[in-house]
Every structure is written in C-alpha cells, then in structure tokens.
Amino acid sequence: MDFFQYKNGVYHAEDVPLPAPAAAIGTPFYCYSAATLERHYKVFSGHFSDMDAMVCYAVKANGNLAILKTLARLGSGADVVSEGEIRLALAAGVDPQRIVFSGVGKTAAEMAFALEKNIFQFNIESEPELRFLSDIAKAKNTKARIAVRVNPDVEAGTHAKISTGHKESKFGVAMPEAMPLYRLAATLPGIEIQGASVHIGSQLTSLGPFAQAFARLRAFAGELRAESFAVKTLDLGGGLGIPYGQEDPPLPAAYADIVKREMKGVGCKIIFEPGRVLVGNAGILVSRVIYVKKSGERIFIVVDAAMNDLLRPSLYGAYHDIVPIAAPPGDAPTELADVAGPICESGDVFAERRLMKIPEAGDLLAFRSAGAYGASMASTYNARPLVAEVMVKGGQYAVVRSRETYEALLKRDTLPSWLL
Ligand code: LLP
C-alpha cells in the first residue's frame, strides 16, 4: 500500500498535489512519500518484533540521506556495500552496531574504515577477502566480526541480472567450500566468527526459493555449531519483491511465516537486508511530456526523463506503471504508445506499445515504483544533470536533493597543463 493517489482528478503524494513541486523545481524529479516509507518499515519489522531480529536496510536501493534518516529514526540498521554507503548510513545516524558490510570486492581502505567505525559485521565472500580482512584487523589490533556469505545454490526465479544464489554466480562461497573457510577463519588472528549469511537475489515473487535457501542456511548453522563455531547471527539477505504491475509477490506476513518456520528455535539474532520492499513503492519519478510524435503506425510520447534517470526499463526490461498527473476524462480513448526519453540510444524507452490515454505536450506523467534502484542508479549520460529529489510528509514537501546544476556538471572535469 502506498500514499500516491488521485484526489479530485489530480495525482497526489500524500496531501501534496504533484503539480506544485513540478512548478517550483521543474521536471524531472523523484518524489518520495515519508508515510509510505514509514509504513513499509513498520509492517516489515513489525512481523519480527517477537524475535531477536535486526532489520538492516539495503542502502544501495536508495541512499538519499532523508530516506536513510527516516528509516534510522525508526530503528533501522544498514546493509552497505561501500565506504560511501557506510558514510551515508553514519551521517543519517545509523548505529554502527547495526551496520553489516556486504559485497565481493571490499578494498583495504574500505575495510580499514569499517573497522575504525566498529561496524557490526562483515559478510565475507571469499578466502582472499577473509585473509585480507584478518591482516588489516590485526594491524589495527582489533578483530573483525564476520559471517561467511554462503551460496545455497537455489534458483531465485527472478531476472538473470539480479539473481545471485545459484552456483555459477560470482556471489558467496559454495556450500562445500564454506566449512573449510570457517576452519581457516578460526585460525586467523584478526577474525571473530559471528555467523553466516545468504542473499539469493532481488525482486523474488515466490517464497519457495527463500524457504530452500533458509533451510540450507539453517542446516549449515547446525554443522557450524557441531564444529563448535559460534553462530550468533544468521543473515537472511533481502530480495522480497514488490508489485510493479501485474505480479503478485508474497506479502511480508507470508515471508515472515517462512522465516519463522525455518528459523524456529535457532537461538541467534536474525538479520534482514530489505531494500526494494521498503522504498520501491515509496517513490515515483515525475516527468513532463515534451513531444507527442507520430511515426508511421507508432505513437512516441517523448518525455524529459530518460534512461540515465531511471535505468531499470532499459537495463532489465523492467515494467513501471505510468500514470498521468492530471486524470484524463474517463471516456478518453486509449491507444498503444511508446514512452521514450531524449537520449540518443534506441534503448532509452520506458514502455513499448503500452495501452494508454495519449497525453499532450506539457502534461505531467509519473513513473510509479521508482523509489528503489531509481535515483541510486542514475548517471549523467548525455551530460544530463542528476535530477532533483523531493520528500513529502503530509501536506508539506522538501527538496532532499537539489537538481545538479550545469556549473557543477562542468566543474567535474579539469584540463591537463598542455591544454591550458
Ligand atoms: N543484500 C544484498 C547482499 C544485496 O546484494 C541486495 C541487492 C540486497 C540485500 C537488497 O535486495 P532487495 O531487498 O532490494 O531486493 N538494480 C536491480 C536490483 C539489484 C539488487 C542488488 N542487490 C534492480 O533495479 O532491480
């Protein structure tokens, strides 16, 4: 459930009519609803309030400071994958003891920074990484608390580019190689074994793969304990899908049932790393129609947002609902149209042959479900400044990231002496 809806024929974010920020700051812009975000966090975490659970929001989904602070104030931790994300989480007030550090390519500098900040856990993805972390921790006279990310070899049944738990994936350590890695970890001076973790993919729309992965992790935890290794935490990763269009992903309640079934009596802290399910439907991208172009049989609605602002349709063929900000008359005819951005690539298309009421130049449209992996994956391709971001709370809104200026864009480059 989200708080974007029509009131008197005008699309609102909570109580803010979207033409208001559009007039004030121009388009395109991302708009987040604080009430939706808070609701999603409370629903998700509420299902685990009777357990020793820690929800660590996956910052990569959307690292805007206002999003992070909203979640941190509700008690959220952070799942981070870079020093930049650690810095963002700390800046938003996330307790370092609620930060877990994931990722296959942590650098020495990042590990050192994370150790200095005394983060809760490193999720380790390989033997060289484990040895490297031990050396860095030892040099600092400390120990890094670790969980090995095991690869449970399950098919997540999601898009190939966001599926991570099968055995050919670059992520995690194959189950048969994981136990020897724990034996090694136990001998390394800079390492303290704390638990184990899994993450099998993103935008999962069925529970079966989760159940399989959790069962395998649980069995593995038993083997670890049989060898007297500490299992104080089991990290179940993220991945719960959201409805973008017609799909019908499991509700957090059903996901929680699976977790509770598989983790019953496990006797340790359970960590979650949800990203999309918290922010995905708490954000939209608002854009203005520049031209409506007819070409042969086709109708192209050319908008001022592009693939650099919201990459998911071009990269994954992802579906995003597109809604007009001013509701067209109910009897307006629908036609098949393509919605495209101005970038010079044929892949810069948000929707192909979508049945819709054809807008006019100047009309505002919203791409729904753009809160996760929207702004965080944006680039300045085609020298397009990063768009503004706005957060709404009730009847008020605030700019939570200013539109990048052309001056800032131009200032990024410097000339070598021979060109001065
Ligand atoms: N934990 C780890 C270790 C992850 O790699 C991810 C996402 C998450 C948690 C959060 O997953 P979520 O709950 O958001 O599904 N750009 C893609 C999604 C990439 C996901 C990468 N990892 C997209 O736009 O669909």
Image (cartoon, grey):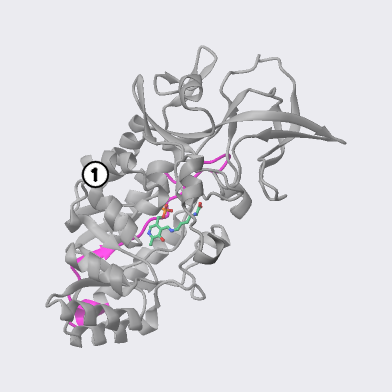
Give the residue drawn at x 37%, y 67%.
Answer: 103
Please give the residue where the numbered disc 1 appears in the rendered image.
72
The quarter of the picture where the N terminus appears is top left
Identify which amino acid the numbered label 1 is placed on: Ala
Judge whether 395 appears above or below 123 on screen: above
Ligand 1, seen in the image, is in the quarter at bottom left
Residue 237 falls within the magenta-colored stretch: yes
Residue 48 in magenta stretch: no
Residue 316 image offset from top left, x and y in percent:
60, 54
In the rendered image, the residue lying farthest to the top is 8
Please report the residue visible at 19 percent of the width from the left and 56 percent of the height from the top.
Answer: 96
Residue range of the region highlighted in magenta in the rendering: 223-251
Figure quadrant of residue 16: top left
Work out whether residue 304 or residue 78 is closer to the camera in this orientation and state it.
Answer: 304
* Helix, strand or loop: magenta stretch: loop
Along the line of sight, the residue nearer the viewer: 377 or 219: 377
Placement of 412 over or under 328, stated as above or below? below
Residue 90, percent from left and from top: 23, 52
In percent of width and height, residue 78 lies at 28, 53
Residue located 58% across and 36% down the image: 321
Q: Is residue 14 above or below residue 143?
A: above
